[in-house]
Image (cartoon, rainbow, N blue to C red):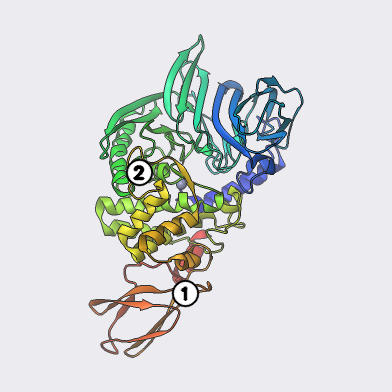
Amino acid sequence: MGSNAINSALVLGILSATALSGCSTPTQEQPTLAQTLETGGALKPLQKNIELDQADLFFDIHPETKSVIGTTTLTLTVTAEQKQLLLDLDNNYRISSITAAGHPVSDFSHEKGEIRFTLPDSVTVNQPFEVTINYEGQPHVAERAPWDGGYVWSKTESGQPWIATAVQGEGCDLIWPCLDHPTFEPQQTDIRIRVPKGLVAASNGRLIETTEGDDWSEYHWRSEQSQNNYGIALNIGPYDKLETTYHSRYGHEYPLVFYYLRGEKEKAQKLFAEFPKQLEFYERVIGPYPFYAEKMGVVQTPHLGMEHQTINAYGQDYKPGKYDFDWLLQHELAHEWFGNQVTNTDWDHMWLHEGFGTYMQPLYGQYLHGDALYHTMMYDQRIGIRNEHPIVSNKPMSEDDVYKADRGPGSDIYQKGAWVLHTLRYLIGDEAFFNATQQLVYGTDDPKPGNFKPHFADTQDFIDAVNAETGKDMTWFFEHYIYQAALPELVSERDGDQLTLHFKSAAKAPFTMPVEIRVGGELRTVVVSKEAKTITLPSNDVHIVLDPESKILRQQDYLDEYSAFEAK
Ligand SMILES: [Zn+2]
């Protein structure tokens, strides 16, 4: 998700979570538990030796009662002996039946967001088996999606149902029985959505078929690549669609699809015209669009946006872009590479999704119109960097541990992450930077359609890629910028024509950075470390500017003062 409004949004997220733990809304049977509203963190012991191979999800949607009747079949494998199975599902749903490996399960519990039962004896190690769960109820309602998760039951201007799900912060267990941790990605996901006739359901992957009943339509979608589990999304409304074929620079073709609200064709066409332009940027700069076998899809939603694999949510009402493009569309599209193609192994490494995702907007500005736009956008992002918690803690973190600013880095995974990448790119150069980025995204720096699959990575994988591409150990850079909260400070003292410089930083690792200095009309580069270094200037009077193009992320008090003022 994007972060233009994330500071206020984080506050809203905290407020709504507090409100939900204290009382239930009228449409809910009971409040959703704090446990269900968390996602990720340390793996539960009973989920450590489980693999999720396939998910078949059926949703019968009833907008008039804001309720859902669902059937989920998971194909699972236990990789070590275990008798009990633990799945996650919000207790707002009532489970009507469970079968496991073909046997009805009469004795199960569903408490505190967890389904537990004993596996039949026929389940053996490394043999896939199916679990089917029938459930129904009024799902948890998202009050301020995407800042909080659940179902959004909205209406179009003409009063028709307009429904979406978004569960990045809370996890899949708000919409289907699942294993609520980012490492569980089904290899194949079938999503069948039954809706009242006249409505359209858009979801992940390819549309396999549409079935019509007397008063309903059913849309069967299938995702045949590793499917980011918080990216599984239902989008329902009176949609029309725009569709075209994209001819990729890699020689293949794939469909571009936009589901928009009926009656808004003109505005939709304008946004749709941006799809191929943005794709061309990503394919040139990062590499092949990962989900070319399915589609590049976008759907108009009642909430702002979310990176739902092959069906990105778009809900900012076609606002004109200050920088000649729709930032939300461009940001969410970035997540097809950073989030869906490469997925973090733990929320602790979420900056790999959001730092890269946020850096892609200035990079696209530079691609479109050059350096002025790039620097303007970087400067916008520099305001509001907090430096209160390290970007990465190197311990299992839930989504809330990361996003709640009193517990973790919060919005720093966005803007500070982008600035870390900006500084790294300056330090190691474009070739090494973009090759390392490709290593992170694809596991190869020569990605071609067919030679990569969605995969997981963490911060160390990116550091390894940077080290491999530069032939140097760059760990020190990440020690200062990723594993420590406070920024390095460039300390300078001027005495006539003598200029003394050093970096001050709390991290123990060495810190050596080439610093550009404009001396009168000339640009000089001085390598500055933690040790003081004195250079002689041409005169006592010459005017100097340190780091005149703001290439280095560093402590600058005036920015903190302004950020504090703006945050009030
Ligand atoms: Zn994002």
Give the CA separation, mark 2 to mark 1. 41 Å
Disc 2 beta carbon < 8 A from ligand 1? no
Task: Quickly name the residue at label 1.
Answer: 510
Is residue 421 toward the left or the right of residue 52 in the image? left
The amino acid pointed to by label 2 is Asp
Who is closer to the viewer here, 185 or 125? 125
Between marks 2 and 1 in the image, the one whose residue lies nearer the viewer: 1
Task: Quickly name the residue at label 2.
Answer: 326
Who is closer to the viewer here, 381 or 481? 481
Q: Residue at x 42, y 32 (%)?
A: 299
Quadrant in which residue 535 is drawn: bottom left
Q: Secondary structure at mark 2?
A: loop
Who is closer to the viewer here, 49 or 105? 49
The residue at the far left in this view is 521
Q: Residue at x 55, y 53 (%)?
A: 348
Is residue 305 toward the left or the right of residue 429 in the image? right
Circle 2 residues within 10 Å: few <14, some 14–19, many ≥20: some
Q: Secondary structure at mark 1?
A: loop
Tally the numbered discs: 2
Question: Does residue 62 appear in the picture of this structure?
Answer: no
Residue 213: image location, x then y, percent: 50, 10
Q: Would you place residue 304 above or below residue 431 in this image?
A: above
Q: Residue at x 57, y 58 (%)?
A: 394
The amino acid pointed to by label 1 is Pro
Quadrant in which residue 32 is drawn: top right
